[in-house]
Image (cartoon, helix red, strand yellow):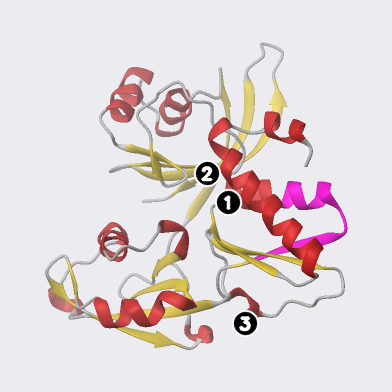
Amino acid sequence: MNEQVYQHYRPEEAEFIDLVYDGLHRVDNHYVPVLLHFLTPREQMIAQQIVEEYGDFKIAFYGGIHATERRRGLIYPDYYQPTDVDYGLTLLQLHYPVKFADISHGKILGTLMSQGVDRNRIGDIISDGEQWQVVVEHEISTYLIHSIDKISNVGVRLEEMPAESMLISQEEWETESIVVSSMRLDTLISNVYNFSRQRAKDLIQQGNIKVNFTLTERPDIEVSEQDIISVRKFGRFWIESINGRTKKDNVHLTVNVLKR
């Protein structure tokens, strides 16, 4: 393993980098595909970079038949041709009294995780504006079907569905080009949502911000390409690319902002 690899990423990403290398070594030793859990867009980027640098093997990502944010990674030898089945996904439909109940992404995720399920075993939670579905690892699907009968006091029933019945998300994203003075979290949030940096700092310190689905209370952390920033009551955005610097050394970015 090239120890210099770690210096290109955040210290807290070292454990994930080790996981990818472990997968590569298993493919190298046994010459069979190795399946990773669901990855965030940034984790997908890191895994792609490491596998390409390692050489000899490939990696592909899949989270369902439509475009998804969270996807499982499959590291495999050149000879192998992956199919959808290799990714071990199950699509679950939530049945509940739609006209009389209010269910949200956060409530669904909270209920799933309250069953002792790690976040990296849950893929996208999808809605078409009325119905809800969730993609999970196949190994936990039966457990969830039998364990969950309520979400936030609303009676629900989970049912396994064919992959081709996956809903098309009603989320709409708007691509924006912005210029920021730094890649600090509070700077990015204040620029994207057009309010003061102090307000952004307050939101962070009050526990209203997640970076890649993990709560942070540090306004000064540096964010980077493919990071997803969630801002409670405002929505979320992700950094598509860093496009260089201006003459005044500001950073030119392309971001995608969830329309509300």
Res 88 quadrant in image: bottom right
Q: Quick one: label 2 or label 1, which is nearer the N terminus?
A: 1
**Marker disc for residue 83:** none
For this orientation, the residue located farthest to the bottom is: 162
Residue pointed to by mark 3: 85
**Marker disc for residue 238:** 2
Res 17 quadrant in image: top right
Residue 213 in percent (x, y) is at: 42, 47
Could you tell me which residue is drawn at 42 percent across and 50 percent down?
259
Q: Nearer the viewer, mark 3 or mark 1?
A: 3
**Marker disc for residue 41:** 1
- Amino acid type shown at disc 3: Val
Could you tell me which residue is drawn at 37 percent across and 83 percent down?
142
Taking 164 as reference, is 8 above or below it? above
Residue 157 in percent (x, y) is at: 25, 83
Q: Are marks 3 and 1 in contact (CB under 8 Å)?
A: no
- Amino acid type shown at disc 1: Pro
Q: Quick one: label 2 or label 3, which is nearer the N terminus?
A: 3
For this orientation, the residue located farthest to the front is: 29
Residue 44 in percent (x, y) is at: 63, 53
